[in-house]
Amino acid sequence: MADTIVDAVSRALDEAPGRNFRETVDLAVNLRDLDLNDPSKRVDESIVLPSGTGQDTQIVVFATGETALQAESVADEVLGPDELEDLGDDTDAAKDLADETDFFVAEAALMQDIGRYLGTVLGPRGKMPTPLQPDDDVAETVNRMKNTVQLRSRDRRTFHTRVGADDMDPDSIAENIDVIIRRLEATLEKGPLNIDSVFVKTTMGPSVEVPA
């Protein structure tokens, strides 16, 4: 990991004005030389941050039986088929749930019903559930997703993602940023050449460029 990333994070933390609340540390990525009108060229990646997000991640699980019982100790909310059907009849409640939740996980057997009842709400938001196969450990899946962020550019050249919190040490935040940049360089059409610039900042603080 480059020392320049650590230096940029340290500056962003040092230059941020003091606040009486915990701030998120965000990364802004500016892309270039990509036709983002073509959906296949857009960034859409889930990345597990090695140092964690530093923030609470809201996760809802759709499950039944034993899986539902296991999910109750790790998920923020566990919903069964009846609640799913109720949400299908209440669009406002479904939208509120979608906006409040970072990630959804669902037993594979429920995915068809989720598509039927919630597809029009979750799909456009990029929040369709991660399918849980019968042999998957729901607790392990949820705990991994608590440290996951979604990189999604849609049709915009600039997009943002959180990379930590202002009470994390700079090295930990820099490690998260390094993982994100490496993933982008590996998946973008022209690799590093498609990244115009990268900036890091706290919620209320000034942006600091992360040198290439």
Image: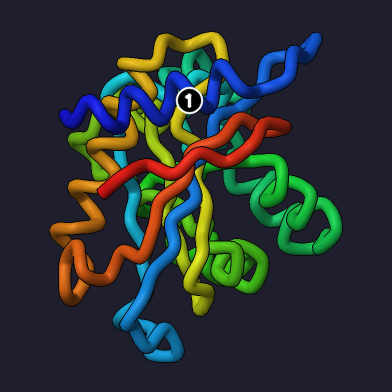
Q: Nearer the viewer, residue 209 or 101?
A: 209
x, y percent for residue 134: 24, 40
What residue sits 53% from the left and 27% below the top? Answer: 12
Neighbor class of circle 1 (other Cα within 10 Å; few <14, some 14-19, many 20+) is many
x, y percent for residue 84: 65, 51
Is residue 59 visible in the rendered image? The answer is no
Q: Quadrant of residue 7?
A: top left
Is residue 149 visible in the rendered image? The answer is yes
Note whether 172 is above or below 113 in the view shown: above
Q: Residue 120 vs residue 86: left or right?
A: left
What residue sits 60% from the left and 27% below the top? Answer: 24
Q: Quadrant of residue 18?
A: top right
Note whether 82 is above or below 91 in the view shown: above
Note whether 124 is above or below 103 in the view shown: below
- Residue denoted by label 1: 164
Q: Quadrant of residue 95?
A: bottom right
Label 1: which secondary element: strand
Q: Nearer the viewer, residue 116 or 36?
A: 36
